[in-house]
Image: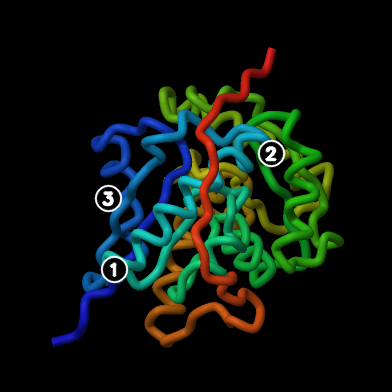
Amino acid sequence: MERLIRIKIINPDHGMTETEMQERIEILKGVVGQDTELSMDCLRDSEICIDSALDVALAAPEILQQTIRAEKDGYDGVILYCLSDPAVAACREAVHIPVLGGGQAALITACGLGYNFSLLTTSRLRIPEKKEFVRTTGVDPDRLCSIRSVDLPMGDLRKNLRETIEHLVREGQHCVEEDGAQVLVLGCLSFLGMAEEVSERIGIPVIDPAKAAVAMMECLIRQGLKHSKKAYPTPPAGQRTWAAGQVRIH
């Protein structure tokens, strides 16, 4: 009997319900084998929703804690359910199982399907951050031909799926017709399950980063691969503590 593959998905958005997380798991089961178990947790102690570079920094400690816990609980790999790949390098240093972020997985996948790609994000305010993020993934920034925004609030993306898809199609068509995109990357994991229709309507491959990350993680685990400790060495032994606090933006 083959050993069950267990993948922990850490959703860095605070306060998601079990129903919301299970909805995502059911969609993601479609891209993994029957011997792969998916489990999702969200942030519980940090009241953060990833919508800026500030949020990425503030979410990092609890993401790291959950990653370490997943390894102790026997999971074979961890996925960071966010296109910003929050704390991914720190998590790779802290554990001996593979850790993937949705952003790097999506962009690497896009590079296998075309010479260039465009990225669709939720807000135009995040375009500078996303442009810089591409450089951290190992993907040649010259392959990014544009970043466009659907300008929808994070909390509304799944409230009206039809409206969100229409926004994605409209901006995706601009990416193809005006920017010359050959591949499109959906720039938020809340766009889960929308890529197929967008692809059919605009006529190019569209990457769903959540699916890309889950499929890539399963591939790594089946090959017995994990991140190099020459690249991500285990930090010096010792206790690290930090004070809980708040940041208020006006």
Q: Nearer the viewer, residue 200 or 24?
A: 24
Q: Specify the label residue 6 is tagged with.
A: 1
Q: Nearer the viewer, mark 2 or mark 1?
A: 2
Which of pointers 2 and 1 lies earlier in the amino acid sequence? 1
Residue 247 rendering spot, x and y as whole percentages: 62, 24
**Alpha-carbon span between mark 2 and mark 1:** 30 Å
156, above or below 118, in the image: above
Asked if the residue under mark 2 is in contact with the one under mark 3, i.e. CB atoms within 8 Å, the reply is no
Which of pointers 3 and 2 lies earlier in the amino acid sequence? 3
Q: Residue furthest left?
A: 1
Which of pointers 3 and 1 lies earlier in the amino acid sequence? 1
Q: Residue furthest front?
A: 238
152, above or below 175, in the image: above
**Alpha-carbon span between mark 3 and mark 1:** 15 Å
Q: Tag 3: Cα neighbours inside 10 Å, few (<14), some, or many (≥20)?
A: few
On the question of residue 237 being in view, the answer is yes
Which residue is at 27% across, 65% downward? 73
Tag 3, which secondary structure? helix
Q: Does 151 sit left or right of 226 as displayed?
A: right
The residue type indicated by label 3 comes to Glu
Residue at mark 2: 53
Q: Residue furthest top?
A: 250
Q: Tag 1: Cα neighbours inside 10 Å, few (<14), some, or many (≥20)?
A: many
Q: Specify the label residue 74 is tagged with.
A: none
Residue at mark 3: 26
